[in-house]
Amino acid sequence: MGEPAPDFDELRRPEYPRGGAPVSPAAPGVATAPARPLHGLPARRGEAGASPAAWSVAGWDLYASVRLDGVRDSGVKPAFSLRVTPAILVTRDVGALRLVAHAAVGAPLYGSQAEPGVRYRFGGAVRYQPANDTRIDAGLEIARAGQAAALLQDANDWGAALPDGRQLACGSARINVAGCERRAGGMRVMKQAGDFTFTASAVAVSSRWSSAPSRQWPPSSPPRRTGDDVAIAGQFRASRRFSHQFEPYVDIGATRWRSAQGDAGRQRVAAGALFPEISLFSGQIYAGVDMPAHGATLPVFGGALSWSPRRALVLAARAETGVADGLPPDAGNALLSPGGAQGSEWRAGRRTWLSLSALWKLAPNLDLTLASAWENARWRPAQPVMARREDQTASAAATLAWTFAPEWLARLEIMAIRQAIPHGPPQKRIVTALSLQRML
């Protein structure tokens, strides 16, 4: 899984979509929802929605909401839970500074998603823009979340700040994570000089996760486990815009994972080009090399294509092949890992990833998102030499969002994941969530 979004949406002030490269896939074996169409691509035909009404308190703009979630998760007991979550977002512009803080607390009303207790998310961010060609973003966040929402949500800004858009921590390579506590911080600096754009970013994520035995094959399920993950990543990108149709760039980035099971990571150097607007299409292609912390250097190739045949419809496809640089799923479990190799003893192999998605605005107040993803990743342990591990993960997601009144939002989300691993039957999980949110 990727960054574990909580069982609620923190209230966000709508903003115009940001330009840039498409978000790349998450870590090998990731059980996460495929990214939505145009996530990170320049928006050409859509329009930003109107901002919700805000209260003004001592110069701060305050947005508040309360949300009721009913979730059915096939991977936990009891399978159904009900939770209420009040949330608040405050913003303020002070000259060249924009200050933002958000808080949300989710209290269980019935059942639990494998782990009872209050869920929370607190964070703050600062944007400093002294000139139109310079911008600095920094922020911190702490959260305690259940895994059901992580299967349903897209990457947040922390994931987008990483070298490959990866979502990090909280059992990112495990399908049966029950919940986690997470701390994250990061910074991004952007500078434009004529037609050139330079971007540097860094992020650190620390988490403590717990897993529960699978309900699907109890006889061979591992016992409940806990663990700590730390990930650090950085990236530098330089690009030049020749026109609205062509923008080449160069990327240099590195990611490092550390956990009780071992360590992993990679360095990447790649060059590519963005095609922000060619008729009804936009896209990206890139190529380079991946240098894993454990394993052989491999070439990386990838690309994305988005097509908007109608104003209300966007279709997108993405693909990449490169190094499988994360820890193998359940790398510390001797029953699932040939030879019982720890994470640091695995040599990364190749990862292939494909995602298809569609965003359809059925009506002015009704949106439908469909997405699917497939990934194949391989590793080889140091001993025994002939052993090899290959994992395949497939996922599909559907989201229907309906704004049936100016201050009311209803949303139905369905996410299904299947992960095939050696030395055991496939792991499966289906999460369905029905949410009702009221702006206050």
Image: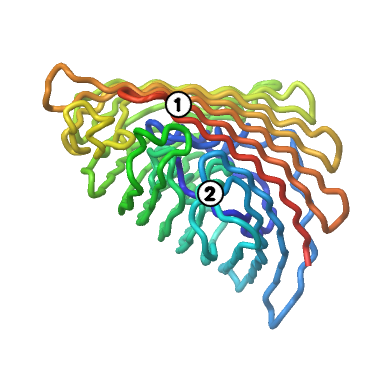
Q: Which amino acid does label 1 sit on?
A: Thr
> In the drawing, does residue 259 fall left or right of residue 428?
left
Residue 146 horizontal/vertical position (percent): 51, 53
User: Which residue is labeled 2 in the image?
Assistant: 156
Q: 63 left or right of 204?
A: right
Tell me where residue 132 appears, x and y as whole percent.
Answer: 57, 55
Q: Can residue 311 be seen in the rendering of this structure? A: yes
Instruction: Name the residue at the top extreme.
Output: 386
Three-letter amino acid code at disc 2?
Asn
* SS assignment at label 2: loop
Disc 1 secondary structure class = strand
Residue at image location 11% in from the left, 26% down from the top: 383
Mark 2 or 1, nearer chain start: 2
**Nearest the camera: 270 or 213?**
213
Q: Which of marks 2 and 1 is in front?
A: 1
Depth check: give the residue in front, 184 or 411: 411
Q: Can residue 130 be seen in this view?
A: no
Q: Where is residue 56 in the image (x, y as percent from the top left)?
A: 74, 76
Quadrant including the N terminus: top left
Q: In which quarter of the image is residue 39?
A: top right
- Neighbour tally class for label 2: few under 14, some 14-19, many 20 plus, Cα within 10 Å: some
Q: Name the residue under label 1.
A: 393
